[in-house]
Amino acid sequence: MRTYVITGGTDGMGKGLGLYFLRRGDRVIAIASGAAKGAALLREADAIGASERAVFLRADLSTLAGMSDALARVTSLADTVDGLVFGAQRFRPRREITEDGIEFTFALHYLSRFVLGHGLTDAVARANTPVIMNICGPGGFPGRIHWDDLTLREGYTGTRAAMQASRANDLLGVAFPHRYPNTRTRYVLYNPMMVRTAMAEPLPTPHRILAKAAGYIVGRSVDQAVPPIARHLDEPPTDPLTAFRRRTRLPLTRKDFDPDNAIRLDTLTTELVQH
Ligand SMILES: NC(=O)c1ccc[n+]([C@@H]2O[C@H](COP(=O)([O-])OP(=O)(O)OC[C@H]3O[C@@H](n4cnc5c(N)ncnc54)[C@H](OP(=O)(O)O)[C@@H]3O)[C@@H](O)[C@H]2O)c1
């Protein structure tokens, strides 16, 4: 029985992936902040006879306290993590600063993946085919790291914050094999492109309607999006880091994967977490 840890495992692709693994007999630890969706996941797990293999950990992954709490609880539940999946996200149309003084999107979309990824490195490395799957946005909408204004004090928009977090996750992937040059763990950056999930819910009304309409025209359902993600977890690529936009493998020579920027962000983030 394999163990999968999935942030954002109570909705959208995270939940779809969790139920996929539960159905075939694996164990799933889903982390998210809302009790209602967590309870709904456990009910669905019960209905497919998987209640003993499904765990819901309630934690607010936008705060450092929530991240370390989740880390401690996962560590106490699982010695080995076969697949670590990052899918927690929530779009914020208005700028919000967390209790740690960090911009919300940067904290939830990027920093939680940094903290849990490094915190669970040993547990993942103990697996037979260790893999970290970061569901994010490589090769998607453009965006950049605002090096002098990571908390986006100037000119905040929800999209700008989301794009910055996307680029930060690209660099998080690039930094991983630099940090652990001898690791067997495979790091996969995966952009599912448009999938019909609750992602559009927090958007202001006209944007929400447009996003949902676009989702129905060009998007895929969660059921369609899950199998390719599961395949990468079952048979991780041989290279230490890979990036995909759906089926297309992206060259790591793109400027989004600049190794100097990756090391710069890694250093900055390490300082941020330590302070
Ligand atoms: N959907 C798309 O079209 C699309 C496209 C490209 C990339 N992606 C990426 O794919 C991943 C999954 O997206 P999705 O659309 O499947 O997500 P989703 O359906 O919106 O689900 C998000 C999950 O994150 C959890 N979450 C939200 N705030 C949280 C917090 N503060 N602490 C812990 N958990 C929190 C949610 O549960 P609670 O609210 O209960 O906490 C939920 O389980 C994301 O990284 C997203 O950026 C999605």
Image (cartoon, rainbow, N blue to C red):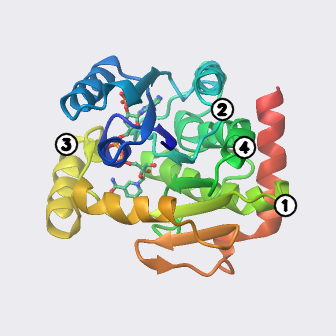
Horizontal side of residue 92 vs 240, given as left or right: left
Residue at disc 2, secondary structure: loop
Is the C-beta of the residue carrying label 3 under 8 Å from the nearest atom of ligand 1? Answer: no
Residue under label 3:
205
Horizontal side of residue 148 vs 6, given as left or right: right
- C-beta proximity under 8 Å, tags 3 and 4: no
Mark closer to the chain start, 4 or 2: 2
Nearer mark to the viewer, of 3 and 4? 4
Disc 1 versus disc 3: distance between alpha carbons?
49 Å
Mark closer to the chain start, 3 or 2: 2
What amino acid is labelled 1 in the image? Asn
Mark closer to the chain start, 3 or 4: 4
In the picture, the disc for residue 182 is 1
Residue 14: percent from the left, percent from the top?
Answer: 38, 44
Disc 1 versus disc 2: distance between alpha carbons?
20 Å
Q: Is residue 185 above or below residue 257?
A: above
Horizontal side of residue 73 vs 92, given as left or right: right
What amino acid is labelled 3 in the image? Thr
In the picture, the disc for residue 35 is none
Is the C-beta of the residue carrying label 2 under 8 Å from the nearest atom of ligand 1? Answer: no
Nearer mark to the viewer, of 3 and 2? 2
Residue 234 in view (yes/no): yes
Residue under label 4:
121
What amino acid is labelled 2 in the image? Asp
